[in-house]
Image (cartoon, grey):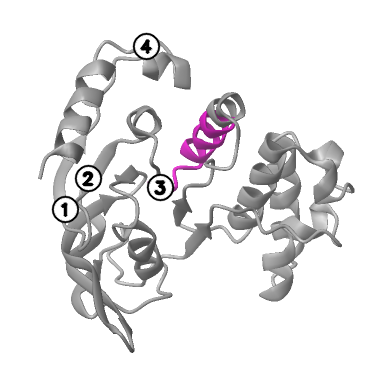
Amino acid sequence: MKNIIELQNISYSYHTLSGETIALKDISFGVKEGEFVAIVGPSGCGKSTLLSILARQLTPEGGSIRIENPDGSLKYPRIGYMLQRDHLLEWRSVYRNVTLGLEINHMMTPERLAHVDQLLEEYDLNKFRDKRPCELSGGMKQRAALIRTLALDPSVLLLDEPFSALDYQTRLTVSADICRLIRKTGKTMIIITHDLAEAISLADKIIILSKRPARVKAEMPIHLTLPDDSLLAARNAPEFPYYFNQLWEVLTSE
């Protein structure tokens, strides 16, 4: 299967009055349609900068991004970008929060709103649609933030440590449920995480970045023998310790 997105020698630097900070240097990797890619690396190495470039919020100083959609077109895919914080608006109900993107983009069509209703049902939030964000748990807020992202029907989802603010038990449950539901849609996902176990459990491929300026140290395809698609099953897979040890070895070697 061909890559739908291919980064070729992407470089980026931040410039201030005190000088230049090189964040990314010659980053190259590809992402296939429907693939889940996890990006790991040391804190401050430029992972979020890389997502911002993919979201077209930043323009790389060097390199290029090549697009080749399954239908042969070269149109940049619709991107959904979910940040670490949920950024729900407290003065709006859950329903008015998850439809905010549709409202801003003048896309409040019956078909789109029906899709939102379906997502609220699938993510167990329908009975909370008229509540305020302060009445939701942390996991519920993240689900609402994801529905707001999915409402615009993106082809590619960019998730920047979306579960980092949750306690460990909630994180396990929410990350497993959210990623299972995303897989059902067939969408492509690129997720940043500092949790190596989470990366192995969720991803089809892990991109390992070096310390700043970030370069790709390795690409690690993940193939787990699973009795089911639960996160617990992934962490109990016989291959899991091998991948964890290999990932740690690459991350800590310079």
Range covered by the magenta-colored residues:
174-192
* Cβ atoms under marks 1 and 3 closer than 8 Å: no
How far is disc 2 from disc 1 in space, using C-alphas? Answer: 6 Å
CA neighbours of label 3 inside 10 A, class few (<14), some (14 to 19), many (20+):
many
Q: For mark 2, what is the residue?
A: 208
Instruction: Report the residue at 58% width, 26% height from top.
Output: 173
The quarter of the displayed image where residue 58 is located = bottom left
**Which of the numbered marks, if any, corresponds to residue 216?**
1
* Cβ atoms under marks 2 and 4 closer than 8 Å: no
Please name the amino acid that badge 1 sits on. Answer: Val
* Cβ atoms under marks 2 and 1 closer than 8 Å: yes
Residue 251 is covered by the magenta coloring: no
Please name the amino acid that badge 4 sits on. Answer: Asn
Residue 228 percent across, percent down from the top left: 44, 14
How far is disc 4 from disc 1 in space, using C-alphas? Answer: 28 Å
Please name the amino acid that badge 3 sits on. Answer: Ile
Residue 191 is covered by the magenta coloring: yes
How far is disc 2 from disc 3 in space, using C-alphas? Answer: 12 Å
Question: Can see residue 79?
Answer: yes
Residue 8 percent across, percent down from the top left: 16, 66
Q: Is residue 88 left or right of residue 150?
A: right
* Cβ atoms under marks 3 and 4 closer than 8 Å: no
Residue at far left of view = 254
Q: For mark 4, what is the residue?
A: 236
Residue at far bottom of view = 17
The quarter of the displayed image where residue 74 is located = bottom left
Q: Is residue 145 left or right of residue 236?
A: right
How far is disc 3 from disc 4 in space, using C-alphas? Answer: 22 Å
Label located before the other in sequence (1 or 3): 3
